[in-house]
Image: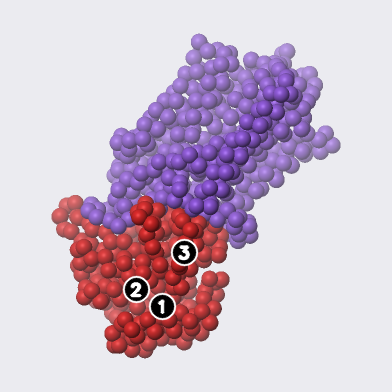
Chain colours: A red, B purple
Amino acid sequence: MSNKGDQPTMERRNFIGGTIAAAGAVTLAPGVILQAVAANKAETEAASSENRWGMVIDTNKCADGCTACVDACSDEHGLEGHGRPQTDAVWIRTVKLKDTQTGHISRLPLMCQHCEHPPCVDVCPTTASFKRADGLVLVDRHRCIGCRYCMMACPYKARSFVHEVITDQSVNAPRGKGCVESCTLCVHRIDAGVMQTACQEACTKEGHGAILFGDLKDPNSEISQALKKYDSTQIRADLELNTGVRYFNL
Amino acid sequence: MTKMYYRELYCGSPVRFWLGLALLGSFIAVGLGAAFYMEHNGHWVTGMTNQIVWGLPHVFAIFLIVAASGALNVASIGSVFGGPLYKPLGRFSGLLAIGLLAGGLMVLVLDLGRPDRLIVAMTQYNFKSIFAWNVILYSGFFAIVGVYLWTMMDRTVNKFSRPAGFAAFFWRIALTTGTGSIFGFLVAREAYDAAIMAPMFVIMSFSYGLAFFIITLIAAYMWGDREIGDYRLAKLKNLLGVFVGAVLYFTLVYNLTNLYATQHHGVERFILLDGGIYTQMFWIGQVLIGSIVPLFLIYSPAFNKSRWAIAAASIAVLIGGFFQIYVIVIGGQAYPMSLFPGKEVLESGFFDGAVASYTPTFPEAALGVAGIAVALAMVAVGARLFKVFPETLEDPAN
């Protein structure tokens, strides 16, 4: 699975990497860049099952009214709205919940949970939905026939169908009318060696720090340490999909 | 038994045949135009959204595909189960099955986001996907029923008609099991994720397919000024009654199972009590029009041997069946997925916890109707080109 057709070529990887590094140098704090580059793997390396990229989200830190993660995702991937919320693509959304018994209110960002056993991959007739060796659940836009069966199967409603012609695409995320898409955990950044997703970057920048991204298979990573220390929840844990995205205080 | 002669179906007046075909052609042309419009602009011009991802075209497509395999039943009863009264109807049964499947698949394919990539679906298989299996099951159905028709129509290979009939029968059971499993295997949504979906779709196919068969048979014999005997029609009618009752039974079991599990009370309440249009479609469409009315028309002594009643019962079964699939496909998606049990959704950027709304648009309906028109046009042309219909279907003397 590590050599799928939609994997960026080396030239493209270099280009994307260069672009991100340049953009990052302008916008990010220098410390973040240094930390990210330090975690780089060689850019020619294929995705490896030695890694499993994931996220942990602290719902207590998700600030009411904040949409920084959603906006950053839209900017990063060129998800422009058409003023039609029913059909506009949504890769990440915020949800505010109230416990019906206790009245406790919590808020969280929700996106593709990058399951270990993704139902979308199971049902996809053409193997367009696939799980990469490093745990990312992605859509091969060259194989997707737009049947939307994955959208029927996803328990998180994480996927969107491209309902209109796309113009002015972002180089970070090739998209196309008639195909299904969802959160990629910023695969273009991972492949360029930048170990920070756009949503995490925005959340940190806002000072909330609710999102932590990292390698679940590296026992020394910040995310693994945090997950070991504190109890976390998977949404719809009953389905036993072993999600790559976990939640604190949910 | 007297020897059965088959003859091409010529309409009493040639003008009527060509006008009928032209009418079907115009429905098909409008449907194809609608498909082009939807593909050219993207699906935002339809009623389908990111919440209701399968819409009216899928209702039409699934309805026709399910009916297709059911239409083959009459041939199966003749060849496989040795029913002499049904045997002369075998050829038409096969032709109708192929026509209905072609119509349904056309609708399904033209609603894909990328219909131009059909070749990808034919060459790249994920064998864990029920959809991929269905691609094989649907294509195989054409081939097997094609061979089956050949063995029925060509005397030199007629001795193979029984094994071909067996193969077709098992294939059609697999096909409808596959279609039902599209929903049965979806763990995410409360209205689906039930093994009973597969056998329920099989029995639905028996019912819709036979209703389609009866109504087109009566129409064809009126069209061609030929005779059908009352006894033969009464047999078909009684069989339809059994199938309608069986669908009702499966619906009852499906809902009772859901009603027993507390976690499914929400979706049951939605479909049975307060789901608005879906509740109405269930009770008025599926139960009243699709089950009670036809059962009354079929079994009431008042309508004994009335052709009008048999035709009306068949049409009611088809209308009810359409509503049933609408409730399954659209109603099942409209009810929100339970992502956070025990929690109420106060705000969401993607309609979590809210009942999704869906208003079908004209292009979707036009594409669906074109599917029915394709089925009928194929039957009309096929019956005129080939010896499909017996010259007469008068009741046997004994």
Earlier residue among tags 2 and 1: 1
Q: Amino acid at mark 1?
A: Arg
Location of residue B20 by image quarter: top right
Q: Are marks 2 and 1 on the same chain?
A: yes
Q: Which residue is mark 3?
A: A167
Secondary structure category for the residue under label 1: helix
x 20%, y 69%: residue = A61
Disc 1 or disc 3, which is closer to the eye? 3
x 63%, y 57%: residue = B119
- In space, the residues marked 2 and 1 are separated at their CA atoms by 9 Å
Disc 3 or disc 2, which is closer to the eye? 3
Cβ atoms at labels 2 and 1 below 8 Å apart: yes
Using the image, determine if residue A188 lies above or below residue A94: below
Q: Which residue is mark 1?
A: A189
Q: Where residue A209 appears, x then y in whole percent? A: 24, 74
User: Of the numbered discs in the image, which one, if any, rests on residue B33?
Assistant: none
